[in-house]
Every structure is written in C-alpha cells, then in structure tokens.
Image (cartoon, helix red, strand yellow):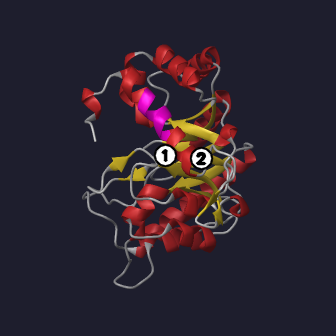
Amino acid sequence: MQNESTVSRRHLLGAAAAGAAAVGASAVLASPAEAGGRRLARVPRDKISVQLYTLRNQLAIDLPASLAELAEIGYTRVEHAGFVGRTATEFRAALDAAGLRATSGHVGIPQPFNASTWQAALEDALIVGNKYIVHPYFGTGANGQPIRDGSVYRAFARDLNKAGALARRAGLSFGYHNHHNEFLPQDGGRRTGYDILTRETDPGLVHLEVDLYWAFRGAHDPVDLIHANRGRIRQVHVKDLAVSGSFEDPGAGLIDFGRIFEPLPRGGTRGVHRGT
C-alpha cells in the first residue's frame, strides 16, 4: 500500500472512489445479486459517505478543491473529523459550496467529562448539519498501553451515557466508534472492554458505529457483533484488511463484505462510511 505522503491529492481522492466502487461490486452499491447461493444485501448509494479523516492532508492543503473533487467523484455525504482549522460556520459554508452534507461527525467527548464543553460541540454539530455525532477512540491509557482495567471502561461508559443524553436533547444521535483495543479481555477474565461498553451504556442514548477493519484486527467477527447488538448498529466504517495487516481498499483485501452486509439492514444500519 502506498505511503500517504507520496500520493497526490487527485490520486488519493480517486482511490477513495475506487474503494467505494469495489464495495459496490461486492455488495453495497450494486443491485442485489446471487453469489454462491446467497443474496447479497444492498446499502443505498445515498447512505454511503467518505470519512474526511482519510483525506486530512489534502483538506489541509486545499479544502474547497478537495471537497469539490469528492462531489465530482459522486459522493454526496461525508463524515467529518474536525473542521480543518475552520469554525463550524465556515466549514458548513465550504460543504455547501461543494454540494456536500456532513450528516455525521467524529467528536471526542471531554475527559474528564464536562457538560459545557460537550454542549458547545453539539451546537457546532448542529451548525454543520450533523444527524449523528460519534466518539472516535478509546482503549489506550495515559501510559500509551491498552487499558486492561474494567473499572476504567465502566467509568467511560457512564460518560458516554451523559454525552448521549445531552446529544438526544439537542436532537442528535450519539454513537461510539471502535478500534481494536476494546476487544481485549479486562481484569484477567473473559469480558472485553467492548462487552462492558455495550452492556453499561443505554441503547437509547448510545448507538454503535462498527469499524469492520478494527473489529477484525481485534479478532472479532463483525457478523457476531451485528447479531449480538441487534438494533444498535446505525453506522459502519468500511475499509479492507491487507495480508500485511494494514489498510486496503474495500474489495481488494481479506474481508468478505457481502457476508457482513447481508444481516445489516435487519440490524437497523443507517449509514456506511468509507475511510480510516
């Protein structure tokens, strides 16, 4: 896989489009088709976004041109991760100029939790036009090592519930995005951090944005996660797993997306996001 720093803005944007098309060929964009006797599910094109963190370097160089190219490729929706040095109002204006909507955004909840700080983030999310606001990362302690103490996860789950309650009051759906550290057992037992987060958070306040790549890296089958968390998975992140263990464009790696997407419509999924 090419190093991101060596890839031009146009090439990387094209790669993102190719990735989305590859997903479509295997399950998402194409009409339902038979494959090995199994009918593949379909995710509507207007439910597919690109995660702008994937293009963070290009956006920092030229935000208007990068957004315009995404629109030219065919994207209509994005999931933002910050505002590229702009205010929420300025970022919304750039999206509007390109004809794009940021229906979702990655925004970390304050740690320690602060209601006023979080309320300001929610107000920005409304300005940008988000329907979903998602906490993007947890699972590493202050020492840089993966958390193995279940009490830390339980405390964080309480903060997620607080953040979700405020988000719901603001008219937003609040979610949690996984990586792989959450799937480590806690306290020397069998319960994982992800088990704690899903059991200790209120499904009415905290939905799940399952990252398929990171679930595999955490040695968990996304299909099992879908069945275990029926109705809570409203968003998924789609990137493929290379033989080396690194990222790969969807359809070019080891993940069978058709098998994963087949149960997703019955699980209540609302959006698919391409990117890191």
Q: Which residues are magenta?
A: 14-19
Choose between 113 and 56: the one closer to the eye: 56
**Viewport quadrant of the C terminus:** top left
Q: CA distance from mark 1 to mark 2?
A: 20 Å
The number of discs equals 2
Which amino acid is tagged 1?
Gly
Q: Vertically, is 64 above or below 103?
A: above
Q: Position of residue 36 (x, y in %)?
A: 58, 65
Q: Which mark is residue 108?
A: 1
Mark 2 neighbour density, 10 Å: few (under 14) some (14–19) many (20 or more): many
User: Looking at this view, is 168 or 270 the one in front?
Assistant: 270
Is 90 positioned to the left or the right of 212 in the image?
Answer: right
**Residue occupying the point 43% across, 23% down:** 59
Q: Position of residue 102 (x, y in %)?
A: 62, 32
- The residue pinned by badge 2 equals 272
Residue extending farthest bottom: 189
The residue lying toward the viewer, choosing from 253 and 70, is: 253
